[in-house]
Amino acid sequence: MEELIATLELYFTKGLGPATIKKLIEKYSSSKAVLETDYDTLKNDFGESVAKIVTQREASCRILAEKELEKAGKFDVKLVPLSSQDYPFLLKSIPDPPPVLYVKGIFPIPENTLAVVGSRKHSSYGSYVVNTIIREVAKSKVNIVSGMALGIDTLAHKVALEEGSFTTAVLGNGIDIIYPPENKKLFEKIVESGCVISEFPFGTKPSAYTFPQRNRVIAGLSYGVFVVEAPKKSGSLITANIANDYGRLVFTVPANINMHSAQGNNTLIKDGAIAITTFEDLQEYIPFLKSSVSTNSLSDLEPIEKEILVFLNTKRHYDEIVSQFYDKYPDIENVLFTLELKGLIQSNNLFYYRVA
C-alpha cells in the first residue's frame, strides 16, 4: 500500500513525466525509495532540476495520492503501480509507461495481446475485416486491445466478447467516466469478462491531449497493432507509428486507392507495415496464433525471453543480441536456444528472428 501511495505521489508531482518516473524507479528500485533519496544523490544521478522537483515537492501531492486511493475503493477500481509484478510486461518495457494503471475488471491481463484500431466512421470494408480476420483472432482467445471508441474499436471489442475472448479497453479519460456514453453497456460487458484500464486520475475528461496519450498505451500494451481502416490523418496512424517506434509489429489490410476512409492503410504498407489479407497471414508473424504454440505461452515465459521476443521485431545478428543483453544476462546463448526449442524464434547463419 505504501508503494502505491508513493507512486501516486510521484505521479502528482508537477514536472515529473512518465519517462522520468520510470528511470527513477529503475534506479532506486521503488517509488518509496525515490521519495526517500536525498537531494545530493538525486542531483548526482539525475541533475539539479529533478533533484529539486522530487525533494521540494508540495505536501499536497501526498494528500492527492491518499484521496485517489479512497476514490479507487469507492469506484471498485484496482490501482497498479509500475513496480508491481502484475503490471503488464510489454507496457512496462516502453520508455514512458504510465506510473499507475487504473483497472476495472479482470486483472492481471493475458499477455497474448493484439491491438485492433481504426476509423470511427468506417466503411463496410472495415466491418468485413473485423468480422472475418479479427473474429478468427478472437476465436484463438487472444487478448484484443482497443480504445472503446465508436467505430472499429467498438466492433473489435464486441467480436472479442462474442467469441469468448479476453478484451482490454484503454480509455482516454478517467476510469470513472464512460466515454463515449453510447458505449455504457459495452463498458459493463468488458468489465465482466475482460478489463478496462486508464492512466488518468479520476475525473479526467477526454480531450485532444488525453487521446494521443491513450494511443501510446494501446501500442505499448500490445505485441502488435492491426490497423483495420484509417484515413490519412487519424489517431490510428498515430498508434501505428508509436508501435513502430516501440519495436512492435504493425499490420494492416490493402485498400482501394479511392477509399478515403482507408487511405492510411496503403500509406502504412508503403512505410513498411505488414500487409494482411487472411488470418493465416497473421499466423505467420504472431507466435501465439500458431497452432503449435499455446496461447498462454507468453505469460509463461521468463522476463529475459519476453525481452528478446520484443527485441526481435526484425532479423538480428547474434552479436547484436549479445551486445544488447549480455550485461544483464550472460547466459544469453542458452536463452536463445530455449526460445528455439519452444518454437518462438528461428536462426539462420547467426541471424535470429521471431518464428515465421
Image (spheres, rainbow, N blue to C red):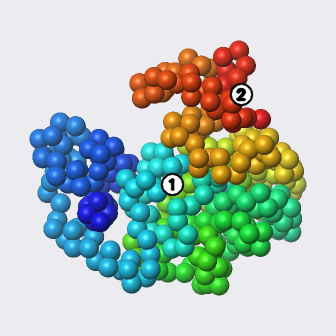
Number of residues whose C-alpha sits closer than 10 Å to that of mark 1, classed few (under 14), some (14–19) or many (20 or more) = many
As shown in the figure, which amino acid type bears the numbered disc 2? Gln
Q: Determine the CA span between mark 1 and mark 2.
A: 26 Å
Q: Are marks 1 and 2 in contact (CB under 8 Å)?
A: no
In the picture provided, is 258 more to the left or to the right than 274?
right
User: Which residue lies most toward the top here?
Assistant: 349
Judging depth in this view, the residue of 13 and 325 nearest the camera is 325
Quarter occupied by the C terminus: top right
Q: How many marks?
A: 2
Number of residues whose C-alpha sits closer than 10 Å to that of mark 2, classed few (under 14), some (14–19) or many (20 or more) = some
Residue marked by disc 2: 346
Residue at (76%, 49%) from the top-left corner? 289
- x and y percent of residue 266 in the render? 79, 48
In the picture provided, is 55 more to the left or to the right than 287?
left
In the picture provided, is 330 more to the left or to the right than 154?
left
**Against 329, is 144 above or below?**
below
Quarter occupied by the N terminus: bottom left
Residue marked by disc 1: 88
- x and y percent of residue 143 in the render? 66, 60
**Residue 147 visible:** no
Residue at (45%, 27%) from the top-left corner? 329
Judging depth in this view, the residue of 63 and 241 nearest the camera is 63
- x and y percent of residue 199 in the render? 45, 65
Residue 192 occupies quadrant? bottom right
**Against 66, is 213 above or below?**
above
Judging depth in this view, the residue of 275 and 347 nearest the camera is 347
As shown in the figure, which amino acid type bears the numbered disc 1? Pro
Residue at (38%, 59%) from the top-left corner? 81
Q: Earlier in the sequence, mark 1 or mark 2?
A: 1
- x and y percent of residue 178 in the render? 54, 81
**Residue 72 visible:** yes
